Each structure stands twice: as structure tokens, then as C-alpha cells.
Amino acid sequence: MPRKKNVLPGSIFVVREQLVLKVRLNDEIDRNGKPKYRKIYTHLSDTPANRKLVEKKQHELHLNQFLPQKQETKVIRIQEAWDMFVRTKDLRPKTLTNYKLAFDVIVRKQNYLLTVENIEEDVVYFKNRTAVERKFSAVTINTYLRQFQAFLNFCTARDCLAQTRFKAQFQKREPKKDVQIYTAEEVTAIIADCRSHDPELALLVELMVETGARPVDALNLTRDKIDLASGIVRWNNKITKVEEPTPISSRAKEILAAALALAGERQKVFRWQHSSLSPLTNKLNASMQRCNIEKSGRSFKHFRTTFKFRIRNLPFEFQMKLLRHSKADVTLGHYTYYDSTEIRERLDATLK
């Protein structure tokens, strides 16, 4: 039977009934130009079990000596690393402010050494504290972790910190929620209430319900994007930023005509900026409260899913066109609301 070839450098043999491991030193030669070897006396007798232990040791030596060694990280304090991050990264002021906020929220101790253990301690404390106090929403927690991870990736790339994946490790994974909409009665009540408090806000809500516009689309809409004669609005694609001409209903044309008349000579259709969405959401919440409508986590974006429910009887390709979706699974998975009562009624009618 041929002898099994040893693929690892070195050899195992017996001297005075004890196993000896002979390994080659990495890239070293003696004065005669021959490879240098090192003998390791294991003080183990020659038995099958002991030979396996020595083979394991041989494998470990192979890994330690012949595979590339991991580069040692530099010793640096976290504040020094942050200052280097700020100096090196060409960030916009708003982005830098967001990163600084995440850094201040997560890093709670003084200027400690930048190590994975110290960072993990702060991240775990931040996650546990927010879970107990419920100070931040799950979206905010993930945003902070993502922004903090950008700083950690910067430190890793400069050999100041070992690789970390805190965002993926600690982010809260919640089960997917069902799509929510506003009922026809709720929409009517909200629009009527807004008309009495802020007519322009009422027009904004009506336009979103009638066109399915995203909040950013509606708030950034300008006169030059609207062609009332042909009933076309050129919305910007969320991903490509390319204008997409989209047909609108007759009612949407009436709403836009009223909004343009209210805007006067202003180029923008509505007076608010997209950055004003939070105050606008507060106005919407106040309106819902006055109408005794339960919020249930709904906001401006759910006027878009409401529009999708209203056009559910159109051909599916028409629905995708009006929502400006390029993938069917987005339309079906994130914007389709299933009315159990309607499904049951249609099922009974079909099975009669």
C-alpha cells in the first residue's frame, strides 16, 4: 500500500519511543543554503491517538507560519479616530451633523481606546437603553447604527479597528406589517377639516389621494412639470431622477388648477419644502385627532397606498405605470391592500 503523502510542511517521526515533530521555518535557510528546520519534542508515546494530536499541532503550526498573518491594528483613541474621520471624509454639513449625532448618542464613555470590546459595550448599552426607554423608533435606531457603522468602517480601512458588523448584528428585525390605507370616509373627513384650517393643506392631501404622489414628489412639484391641457404631470423617478410623464384624472387636474391659482406667481405649487414634512405630519395628526380618526401609524405616505387601493380594478400594468414602479413585486408587496370583506363578497359571487 503506498504511503500517504503529507501535504503539510514538516514530518512526524519517533525518537526514543517519543513522537517528534519536525517543521520547516518559513523562508529561512542555514549557512549551507538549505532550508532550516525546527524539532519539537512532544513527550508523547507513539500511539494512534497521540499521533493525531501531533498532526493537529502540525496543522496549527502550518496555519501560524505559512498563512498570511493578520495585520495588527493601530492603537488609537476614539476621539482621535473621529477627528480623523471628520478631516478625511468630504461630507456635506447635514450628513456630518447626522453622523455626529449618531456618534454622540452611541458613544457614552470618555475618550477610550478604540477596540471592538469598548465599541461593542457602547453599542449594546445603546440598544438595551433604547429598548427599555423606547426613546427612539426602530427606524431611528437602525439609522444611528448605520451611520455609526460608516465611522467604524472608516477605522477598519485604516487598520485602527478590527472588522465590525454592528448594524447587521443589532438592528431590530420586525415582522412585515400589512399594508395600511385611509378609508373613503376618513379621507373625506380629513379633507373637509383641512379646508377649514388650511385650504392649501387640503389641496395637498387631495392631490396625493388622487395621483398617488409621494410626499417628496408633491412638495417639490413645480409649474413647468404640469400640462393641464393634456392631463400629464412629469414626476421625477425616485431612483433614476429622470422625469416620467404620468396621466392624471380629471379631478386631479381640477385640484392642480386650484393649487396653482392659490400659489399665485410662485413657481412651486405648494409652499412647503420636503424638509417641512415633520411639521406637516403634525398638522395631519391634529386633523385626524379633530376628526376622531385613529392614527394607527399612518402618515402622508399612506395616501399613496390609498390611491393604489382606489385603482385596484385597473389593469395591473396601468397600476404600475401610475405608481411609477419598475418591478411588480414592489406594487404587490408594498402597496397592495387586501380588503377581506371585498374578497369574501367576490368569492361568494364567483362560487354561486
Image: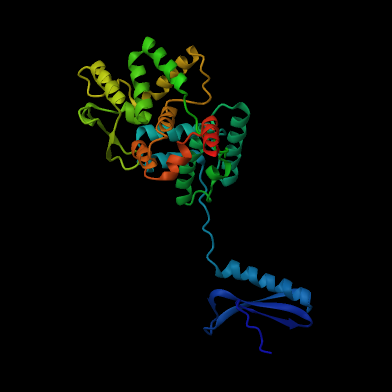
Coloring scheme used: rainbow
Quadrant of res 189: top left
Split into 4 quadrants, where in the image is the C terminus?
top right
Please indicate, yes or no, whether residue 114 appears anywhere in the rendered image: no
Q: Position of residue 131 (x, y in %)?
A: 61, 31
Seen at 51% across and 21% down, the residue is: 295
- 341 and 214: which is toward the camera: 341
With 282 as the anchor, is 223 left or right in this view? Answer: left
Q: Is residue 192 left or right of residue 165?
A: left
Q: Residue at x 34, y 22 (%)?
A: 204
188 in relation to 226, above or below: above
Q: Check the image and report above or below for 63 versus 2.
A: above
Q: x%, y% of residue 312?
A: 42, 34
* Placement of 5 over or under 282, stated as above or below: below
* Percent of width and height locating residue 93: 36, 33
Q: Is residue 274 above or below residue 336?
A: above
Front residue of this view, candidates 180 and 6: 180
- Of all residues, the one furthest to the front in this rendering is 352
- Residue located farthest toward the top when viewing the structure as drawn: 196
Relative depth, front residue between 183 and 28: 183
Q: Which residue does the image show at 47% across and 31% down from the upper left? A: 101
Name the one closer to the observer, 273 or 95: 273
How many numbered marks have been drawn onto this rendered protein structure? 0
Q: Quadrant of residue 50?
A: bottom right
- Quadrant occupied by the N terminus: bottom right
State the image coordinates of residue 127 (x, y, percent, origin top left). Answer: 59, 35
Regarding residue 163, the answer to whether it shows in the image is yes
